[in-house]
Amino acid sequence: MGDRVEEILGWYGSESPGVLRNLRWMLESGRLAGTGKLVMLPVDQGFEHGPARSFAKNGAAYDPLYHYQLAIDAGCNAYAAPLGFLEAGARQYAGRIPTILKLNNSDSLWSSEDPKPAVTGSVEDALRLGCAAVGFTIYPGSCHRNEMYAEFQEIAEEAKASGLAVVLWSYPRGAELSSKGETAIDVVAYAAQIAAQLGAHIIKVKPPTAEIEQEAARKVYEEQNIDVSSLPERIAHVVQSAFAGRRIVIFSGGAAKDTSEVLEEIRGIAAGGSFGSIMGRNSFQRPKSEGVELLQAVMAIYDEQS
Amino acid sequence: MGDRVEEILGWYGSESPGVLRNLRWMLESGRLAGTGKLVMLPVDQGFEHGPARSFAKNGAAYDPLYHYQLAIDAGCNAYAAPLGFLEAGARQYAGRIPTILKLNNSDSLWSSEDPKPAVTGSVEDALRLGCAAVGFTIYPGSCHRNEMYAEFQEIAEEAKASGLAVVLWSYPRGAELSSKGETAIDVVAYAAQIAAQLGAHIIKVKPPTAEIEQEAARKVYEEQNIDVSSLPERIAHVVQSAFAGRRIVIFSGGAAKDTSEVLEEIRGIAAGGSFGSIMGRNSFQRPKSEGVELLQAVMAIYDEQS
Amino acid sequence: MGDRVEEILGWYGSESPGVLRNLRWMLESGRLAGTGKLVMLPVDQGFEHGPARSFAKNGAAYDPLYHYQLAIDAGCNAYAAPLGFLEAGARQYAGRIPTILKLNNSDSLWSSEDPKPAVTGSVEDALRLGCAAVGFTIYPGSCHRNEMYAEFQEIAEEAKASGLAVVLWSYPRGAELSSKGETAIDVVAYAAQIAAQLGAHIIKVKPPTAEIEQEAARKVYEEQNIDVSSLPERIAHVVQSAFAGRRIVIFSGGAAKDTSEVLEEIRGIAAGGSFGSIMGRNSFQRPKSEGVELLQAVMAIYDEQS
Amino acid sequence: MGDRVEEILGWYGSESPGVLRNLRWMLESGRLAGTGKLVMLPVDQGFEHGPARSFAKNGAAYDPLYHYQLAIDAGCNAYAAPLGFLEAGARQYAGRIPTILKLNNSDSLWSSEDPKPAVTGSVEDALRLGCAAVGFTIYPGSCHRNEMYAEFQEIAEEAKASGLAVVLWSYPRGAELSSKGETAIDVVAYAAQIAAQLGAHIIKVKPPTAEIEQEAARKVYEEQNIDVSSLPERIAHVVQSAFAGRRIVIFSGGAAKDTSEVLEEIRGIAAGGSFGSIMGRNSFQRPKSEGVELLQAVMAIYDEQS
Amino acid sequence: MGDRVEEILGWYGSESPGVLRNLRWMLESGRLAGTGKLVMLPVDQGFEHGPARSFAKNGAAYDPLYHYQLAIDAGCNAYAAPLGFLEAGARQYAGRIPTILKLNNSDSLWSSEDPKPAVTGSVEDALRLGCAAVGFTIYPGSCHRNEMYAEFQEIAEEAKASGLAVVLWSYPRGAELSSKGETAIDVVAYAAQIAAQLGAHIIKVKPPTAEIEQEAARKVYEEQNIDVSSLPERIAHVVQSAFAGRRIVIFSGGAAKDTSEVLEEIRGIAAGGSFGSIMGRNSFQRPKSEGVELLQAVMAIYDEQS
C-alpha cells in the first residue's frame, strides 16, 4: 500500500520536499494511512451557516476541542477549520493530527448571487499553528472569481515556499449559473480542472449530477459519447479532468443525510476512483459514537477500493 | 477565584505569553479582579454619535481625563476609546488601568444601510500608548463585511505578534437585516461565532431578543427546542455559540436607561453566564458619583455569579 | 503668559518632545507669542479656487514669496500652504516662520457632492522643507470620509514619529448634508470632535451658525438647553466639543468680507474662547499694508483675551 | 507613597506612555509597590558562573520555575534572567510578576581581561514573553566597550519604540582597570553616569568602595572635599552621578554572604538613598524559606527609607 | 507512555503549536516513539573529518541515501546532517523520518585552537527540505564563542517563528580549556546550561568524565559533595544542569568503539536519566546490518528506562 503513497507524491515533482512532507503526513495519518485514500473532517459550518444550524443537533459540537477529538477518534487523515477553531486546540493537539487552516470563509448574514469569501487567516498563522496545509475556497462562476483566483495565487505561492500543502475547495456558484448547474457534471469537471491549473495539491469538489449546464460543453459530451449516467462514471470523469488522475481530488458530502444514503453515495464516489471524501455535517451532527461509526464505515469503503 | 483566571487563560494556548500577560492584566484589574468577570468602560460615542448627544447630559464627560478617572474610581477592568481620547490621558494614566485602543470607528454624519467604519489607529499606536489590547468593530450583515474581516485579520495578526490582546465588537447591521434582526437571538449568536472564528480573544455583542431573523435558523431553533424565551437562556446560548464558553463574551448595554432597568437587564445577562458587561452611555451620561455607583452595582451582580 | 503655553503643551502628553518642540515653535512665534493664541495665514486658494479667483484682486499675491513675507510682517504664528508655494520660498525663509505643509488639496475643475482631496505632499517633504507641521483636510459627511480618515491616520502616525505637529482642517461636506448643515452648530461641533479623536494637535473648523442639522442632535440640544444663540456661545460649545478645551481649536474666516465685518466676527470668536483664527483671503486679497493691518487688528483682539 | 511613583515617572518625559506603563508595573509590584523602591531577583549566574557554582548549594534552584516562584513569594518588584530561564516559565507565570529579559550574557569558560558578553536574545523575544523590560550589560573599561555601547544603543531604541523599559548593568572591567578599581567610588560613579547618558531607565551598579582609581579624579575628589568615607556617602554620590537622582539606580549584592553581613550592607546602601537592590546569589543559594526571609528583610529596610 | 510526551511538551510553553508539532514528531517517531527517549543518527563527519576518514570503513556510507535508510531501518527518532546530505535524499524520504538540518559545520583542512564553524544552511532551507528542526553547534570555551551564540540567537528566533524545533550541539573547545577539560564534568554541565539558557529545545553534549577543569567549580563540587564518580551520577548532574530536567538533553557517542564498549557506556548514560543518545560513527562505520543491530540495542536500553 505504501507504494501508492510514493506514486501519488511522485505527481508533485515541482514541489519542495517540505510540501511533500506535509502531503505525506496527511496520506499516512489515520485509519486510511498508506492507502492513498483520504477522509477529512472539515468544520467551517459555524462560520458559514451559523452556530445553531451547525451544532444544535449535537450540542457537544459547539466545543472546538470536540472536533479535534472526533477526527482523531474516527481516524481521519486531517481536520480542516477556520482560524478560531484551530487556535482553540492547537496547543493540546499539536502534531496529533494533520490540520488544514481554512484561509477564507463566507458567512450567511449577507448573501449574494456572486459570492466571495473573506480572507480570515494567513500562511504565517498556519506555520504558527503547526498545520499541514492551508485551505482556500474559490467560486468559479462568480463575477468575483478572478479576485479569488488571484488571492489564491498569492497564498499558494507563499504556502509552497514555506513547505505547506495547499487544498482548494472549488465550488461553482454565481449569477450566471443555474442552481442545478452548480453541480452539473460539465461544471464540476471544469471546476476541478481550474483548481488543478491554479496549482492546488488537493482539490475538493461536490459530487456531480448528470446535468449539463453549458451548451458548448453539451455538444462535446454528446459527440464524444462521454457517459455520465452513473455516479461512478461521473466521478471518474471529474478525476480525469484533474490532470488524468495526477491530482488528489476528494468529494464533499453536502447536507446531512441518513446513514444509508450517505454510505450509498460514498460507494458510488469510491467506485468512480475518488481519492476520498470530506465529510462535515454528517459527521458532527450526530452523537459522537455515531459520527465515529459513520466515518469509519466511509473509510472502510475506501479501504476496499485501495 | 484566581483559579478561574488560570482556567480562562488556558483557553488561549495558541497565543504567546505576551498576549496572556495582557489578558491577565484585564482579568486581574479593578473590583472584579480574579473573578473571571469583566466590566469595561467604552467611550467611543463622541466619534460615533457626536459630542452633544454623548456628553451634554453630563458636561464633565467632554473631558477625556474624566473617563480614565471614572473607570478607575468605579473599579472597571479596562477602558476602551479611540485614539484621541486615549492620547489625551495616556501619560498621566500610563499603567494605571488597562486600556483598549479602538482601531476603527464610524461617525453619524453619513449613513449607510451597509456601514463600514474607518480605520483610525494602528497596532504601533497601541504599543506607544501602553495599551493592553486593540479593539475593532465588524458589522456582519453589511455588504462590506468581508473588507472588515480582512482588515481585522491583518490587525489581529500584528497585534498578537506584538503581545497585545484583541477585542472584537461584533454588531450585525446591513441592508439585508431587518432592524429587529440586528439583535435577534440567531443573529447575535452567529455574530459571536464569527468573532470567535476570526480569532478574537474577547467578544462584545448586544443582548439578544427572542426574535429569530433567518428562516433557515428558525427551523433549527424549533426542531431542537432551543429555549430562547428568557434573557438568561439567550445569553447562555450566545456564550455557548462562542466555542462552548471557551472565549470571553461580554455584552453591551445599549441606549441609556434608568438605573433599575439597567440592573434588571444585567441580572439577566449575568444569570445566563456572561463574562461581563461593557457599559458606556449608562455610565457617563449621569453625574460621576451616580455613574460609579451604577458600575459598582453592576460589578456586585457579577461578583455574586463568580 | 508663558504659563499658558506650558499648560497647553501639557495636554499633549502622548507626543514626543519633538512634536512639542514644533507646537511650541508655533505658540511662541509672532505677535501672539506666549499668549496661547494663534493667528495663521493659509494660502491654498490658488489650488482650491484657481489663480485669478485667488490673486487677481491683489496681483502681488501671485508671488509665493509675498505670502511668507506677509505672514512675517503681520506677526502670524505660522504660514500654511501646499507643496509648491512652500518649496518656492523655503530656502530664503528657512526657520524664519513656522510653516505647515498642506498634504492634501482639492481643485475646482471637477466637483462632486462627495468630495475627496488629492494627496499632494508627504511627511518627508515637510521634513525636507523644515516645516513645523503637516496639514490635512477631511470632509466628514462625504461618502469618502473613511478613506480620508484612514489616509490621515497613516500620515499622522508618520508625522508624529518624525516629531512634526499635525493640523487637521475638518470641514463637513457631502451629499447627505444640506448646504446650511455644513456650518450648523451640531455639525461643526461634531467635526471638531472627530478631528480630536483622530489625534489632531490643532483643529480648524468654520465658525458655526445657530442651525441644527441632525434631528437626533436637535433633541439633545433642546433637552439639555444648550444655548447656541450667540456666536461666543457657539464657539465655546465647539471648543468644549474638542476634549473640553484640551485641544487647540482655531476658526477660519471664510469668504472675503469688509474689515469691520471680519473684526466683528473675530470678536465673537475670541469671546467664545477660540485659540485663534486662520485667515487667508481676507489677508491677501487686499494691498499688503492693509492685509498686515487687518491681521494685526485680529491679533490685538486675541491678545486682549489671553 | 503613590506620589513618589508619579514623581519618578515624571523623570522619563521623553518616553512614550507604553514605556511608562512598564516602569510603573515594576514600581507598583510586590511588597515595595508604590514606595519608589525596588528589590529585584536576577538569575543569570547559571550562564555567567555555571550551574553547580550557582545552584548546588540549594539544589531546588536548578529549576527555572523555582526562581519565578521565589520572586513572587518574596514580593520582588521584578525577576531578571536570560532567554532560556524566562522561556521555561513564561506561559505559567505570564503577567504574574514583571520580568526583564537579559539580552546579553557572558560565560566563564573563556576569560579575557577585556570581556564582552554575547547577545543572546532580542526585543521581539521580550515582547513575545510579555516582559516589562530588556536588560543589558556593559563593561566600561573594556577595550570592547564601544561595541557594547553601540549594541545597547540599537537595542534601547527598538525597546523604547515597542514600549519596553530598559535596564542597564554597568560593571567596569578591563585590562586598564585594577581589580580594586572595578568598585572604586570614582569608577562606579562614572559607570552610573555612562549608563544614564546611554539612555537607560534603570541602572545597576556595584556598591562602591572608598578607593579612587583615576588620578585625574582623585584630584577633584580631594579639592572638592567629596566625602566618600562611608557607604551611605558613597551611595549618595553614585545616585547623584546618575543625573542628580533623576534616574533609578540600584545596587547589586555581589558574592553570597551571611545574613547579617548582607543586611548590614543593605542598610548602608539604603541610607545613602539607593532606589533599591538586586540580589541574586544571596537570595537563591539558601533554602527557599530563608531566601524569602532575607529578601523581605531587605525590603523592610527599604520600606523604612521610603 | 504517551503521557510522558505530553509532560515533555509542557516544558516548552513559550513556543508556538508549530514548534510543538515538530518536537512531537521526533518524540513519536521510530522505535522509541512515545517513550520520551530519543536516539538520533547524525552524519556530519564527511564535512567535519573528510570522506575517507568517515566512510571508507563502510563504503556504502559514501552514499547520502544510505544514512536516511539506516536511520529508518534502525528506528531512529531523527536524522541530522548538513545541507548537501539532506538535499540528496529529501525528496524520496520527505516526511518518512524527522530530519534536522545542521546549519553550521567545521572542516578539518584548517584548524584552530579556538574553532568556529561556518554557517552552511538557513532556516528557509530547513522549511524547503521539510525538516523537523535546525541544528547548530557552539563551542563554549572558544574565543569566538560569542559570535556563535549571537548567530544561534538569530537562527533560533527565526526557526521558532517558522514553527521549527531547535537542536543545539554544545561542545566545549578552545585555547583555554585543557584537552581533558573538554569533557570534564563541570565543563559539560556548564555547556548544557549555556545551551538551555540560549533557548535550545534539545541539547547535545558529550558524556562527561570525572575530571573537574575549573578551580572555582572544583571548590563547589567538593563543598557540596556532588558525587560525580560514576557515569550515571554524572549524567544525572548534566540533566539537572539543563533546567532540572526540563530540557531534553541527549549524549553523543564520540569516537567509534566496539559494540560492548558502546553498550556499556549507553547503559551508564541511560541509567543517569539521559533523554537519549546521538550516535554517528558507531552506527555507520560498520556494515549496515550491524549498525542497525547496534542502534536497536541502544534503543532497547532506553526503552527499559522509560
Image (cartoon, coloured by chain):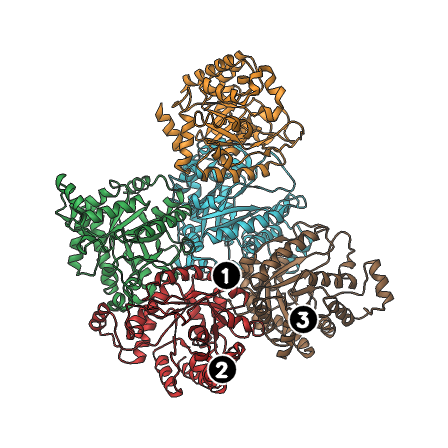
Chain colours: A brown, B cyan, C orange, D green, E red
Q: Report x, y in % for residue A135.
A: 62, 61
Q: Could you say which disc has been placed on residue E162 in the image?
A: 1
Q: Say if A134 sits above or below A274 in the image.
A: above
Q: Report x, y in % for residue E78.
A: 48, 74
Q: Could you say which disc has been placed on residue E74 in the image?
A: 2
* Number of other residues with Cα within 10 Å of mark 1, as a class: few under 14, some 14 to 19, many 20 or more: many
Q: Say if E76 sits above or below B244 in the image.
A: below
Residue B76 is left or right of residue D300, and the answer is right
CA gap, disc 1 to disc 3? 30 Å
Instruction: Indicate the quadrant containing the N terminus of chain E: top left, top right, bottom left or bottom right.
Output: bottom left
The residue to which callout 3 is attached is A276
Q: Is residue C237 visible?
A: no
Lower position in the chain sequence, tag 1 or tag 2: 2
Q: Chain of mark 3?
A: A
Q: Is label 1 in a helix, a strand or a loop?
A: loop
Callout in the foreground (2, 3) = 2
CA gap, disc 1 to disc 2? 29 Å
Image quadrant where residue A238 sits: bottom right
Q: Is label 3 in a helix, a strand or a loop?
A: strand
Instruction: Indicate the quadrant containing the C terminus of chain E: top left, top right, bottom left or bottom right.
Output: bottom left
CA gap, disc 2 to disc 3? 33 Å
Callout in the foreground (1, 3) = 1
Do the residues bearing badges 1 and 3 touch, measured as CB atoms within 8 Å?
A: no
Q: Nearer the viewer, residue A162 or A284?
A: A162
Q: Is label 2 in a helix, a strand or a loop?
A: helix
